[in-house]
Each structure stands twice: as C-alpha cells, then as structure tokens.
Amino acid sequence: MTERDIQIESRNLNLWYGDAQALKNVTIAMPGNKVTAVIGPSGCGKFTFIRCINRMNDLIKDCRITGELLFGGKNIYDRDINVVAIRKKIGMVFQKPNPFPMPIYDNVAYGPHRNGVRDRHELDEVVETSLVAAALWGEVDGKLDIAALDLSGGQQQRLCIARTLAVKPEVILFDEPCSALDPISTARIEDLIGELKRDYTIIIVTHNMQQAARVSDYTAFFLLGEMIELGKTSRSLKIRRRRVRKIISQAGLDRAIRRDIMVQKQYQTELTNVQQNVLRLGELANSAIKDSVEALQDHNVEQAEAVITGDSGIDGLSADIDALCMQLPVLKQPVDRDLWTIGAVVKINLDIERMSDLAVDIARVAIATRDKKHVRSLIDISAMAHIACEMLGGALRAFGELNSDLACEIAKLTFRRSPSIFHNFY
C-alpha cells in the first residue's frame, strides 16, 4: 500500500468516554476503493473507531478524542472542518435497518432534497440510480409509493444503502450490516459490497470471520481498544472441509493473547480491590452505627460530631466503589460470574451508604437532645444497634467468603430477633 493509495488514516487516535479509555493509540491506514474489515471481540472498540471516521462520537456527552484522523490528507478534527460536509462524504449503514417511516421514493430522495435538490426530474434520476446501485430497483420498480417499513429486512437494508448512495459519498461505513439478516439477504449484501468498492471506499465492522474473508481486501484486528494488526486478507489458507480463512498472522495472535492475559490479571486485581473496598466500607458504617447510638445514649456531642464528620470519608469511598464498578466492564468484557459480583457490589454499596446516612441521622438527634433527659431507657435501641451491627458484619463476611450458609443464617436473624426487640420498644 503506497501513500497515494491511502484515503483514510488515523495517527495515535485515542478516545475516552469520561474516564474510560475506549481507543488507545490507534494508527491505521486504509486504501481507497478497497474493502477493509474491522474485526475483534465485543467491546474491543470496532464500532467506536468507525464512528470517529464520520465524527458521530461528537454527539456523545463526555467523549474526548486526541490524535489525528485524516481523510484525503486533511485532519477531520481540525477546527475549520465542516462536520456536515464530512458526513456527506462519509456515509454510514447501521447494524439494524432503519428506513424512515415514509415511502421508498421519499427515503432515497430525502438526502438530496435536504441538500437543495428540488427538481423532480433530477430527484427521479437520483432515486433510480441509487436503487439500481443498491441492487433493489428490480424489486421495487413501480412500487416506490409503498411504505419502506413494508419491505423485508434484507430489502430495508439495501434501501438504507441506496439512501446513503443518494448523497454521493466517497466512503461508506458498514456496522455489521448482515447481523440481522437471513443467509440469502446476507449473500446479496455481500455481493453488493463487492460491486460498490469500484466506486467507493468500504469499511465494514463484522463479528463474522468468514464474512471478513469473503468480502474484504484488508483486515484490521482490534482488541481492548488497540489495533493489533492490519494486513491483506489472506484467502490462501483453507482448513479441510470447514474452509476457515486465515485472517491474522500467528505473531499478531500471540501479541493479542499476551495482552489479553495482562488485562485479565489487571481485571482480577481491580475486582479484588472493589470487594476489599466494600468490606472496608462496611466496617466504617458499622463503627458509625455503634458510635452514633452510644452518643445518643450517653449525650456525647463530640462522639456524635465525629460520626457526622466521618460520613464524608464513607461517601468518598462509596463513590470510588461506584466508579470502579463502572470501569470494570470497560476494561474487559465480564463473564456471568463477574457480572453477578459487580451487580452485588453496586447493591451492597448503596445499602451500606444508606446505613451510614442513618447513623448520621442518629448522631444529629444525639446533638439535638444533648440537654434533654430520655423518657425511658435506651437499652432496647442499644440492643437493636448491636444486632444490626452483628448482622452487617456477618453479611459482609458471607460476601467476602462467598459463604451461602452464613448468609442464610444472617437472613434468619431478621425473623428470629427483630420482632421481640420491636415489641419491647413499642
């Protein structure tokens, strides 16, 4: 690939969603009038990358991009770039067909009409030319006034392609265009992509390795936000009967495996840190409950004020736990067990933080009643606090040890002890 062949190029492209980095120093060059397939596991940054190419990520709050993305040698993220003009030149076809709720004709003519074309004869020509190029004209000729939503899924996807072609782009981005289609419709879309590359540059995101081998000239392999390898799609290696295509070299695969192992270790470390932080949060809340009740019973203002002051530290740790839980799925696609753990941590974190707020409420009552005598003894309240702290400590041990038997015993305490305490109190 020579420099003259390159139409789209990224240089050290980085992207963050808030604090989570989705793309990491992506440097890639894609030639014109070729099909480049972007492959990789879910969450690796494929779709995020192609959204950068026509600046769709601009619409996402807290999205931040550094580096360069060149189209025709010009950085599309320069301040003087007309974003609307860029999106006219770089069209996009999405995973799920999304025709407008209007007739077929109006769907295709929508773009040219919005761009100032008003002559009916010219619009007719654009509609027919686009539908022919999208291999749909033969199926809808004479039916252009019917609703686009009445077409089949495969026809709707080709209509979306025709709508993209109508504004005369130079590049077409495809986001898994066949994932929701049947095999026959998939074959038609793949054949169409092969024809379109004569006039357009095609970039297609796909999970289907065989599809990448069938339709692409070049293949880029993404993993964990990094572009691991880009090269010509090999069609020479075929494994018996299965006819599996070799997409990436062994060296690239080895690098990906090493990086995956490193990320897996980091992920497990962060997951362990989250669990330990939850246990620490529970200990702090437990202490706050004990101290607030003691302050109420003993009219100890200093102890009550210490509980209120210490709540900011508990809130900060709780916020850190929430942030870590949000970052973990970005670091690595979690398995079911990990998702259960993360979901449990989020729920436990919220419950413990609420318990801490209740301790603060008790401490404020202690301050407000410091000069008043209790109407009756607070022995029952002290006993309730003791049971609550005992249950919280046991529940946290059960969580940390994944001990279901202990968890069941803690749950039984609610029914075995609480009624008598409440009865005595009231």
Image: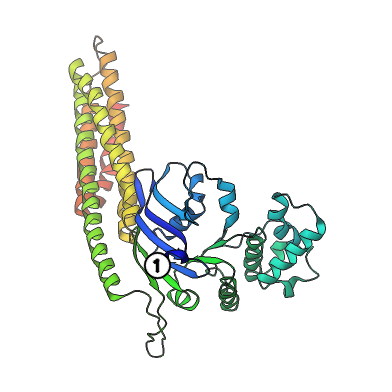
- In this rendering, the answer to whether 426 lies above or below 46 is above
Q: Nearer the viewer, residue 380 or 404?
A: 404
Residue found at x 48% / y 73%: 216
Q: Quadrant of residue 367?
A: top left
Q: Is residue 403 visible?
A: no
Q: Is residue 237 left or right of residue 299?
A: right
Residue placed most toward the observer, 34 or 401 = 34
Left or right, residue 83 beside residue 107: left
Amino acid marked by disc 1 = Ala
Residue under label 1: 220
Q: Is residue 260 at least partly visible in the picture?
A: yes
Q: Residues within 10 Å of mark 1 (few under 14, many from 20)?
A: many
- Residue at the bottom extreme of this rendering: 240
Quarter of the image with the C terminus in it:
top left
What residue lies at 24% left-to-right and 9% top-to-bottom? 371
The x, y position of residue 320, in whole percent, is 28, 39
Give percent across and percent down for residue 350: 33, 39
Residue 114 percent coordinates (x, y): 70, 50
Q: Secondary structure at mark 1?
A: strand
Which residue in the rendered view is the most extreme toward the top? 371
Q: How is the image coloured?
A: rainbow
Image quarter where the N terminus lies is bottom left
Q: Nearer the viewer, residue 130 or 174?
A: 130
Of residue 6 and residue 69, the one placed in the foreground of this image is 6
Picture coordinates of residue 403 (x, y %)?
Answer: 21, 55
Residue ID at (43%, 71%): 218
Residue under the point 76% across and 64% down: 125
Instruction: Answer above or below: position of 134 versus 399.
Output: below
Answer with left or right where residue 14 lies relative to residue 166: left
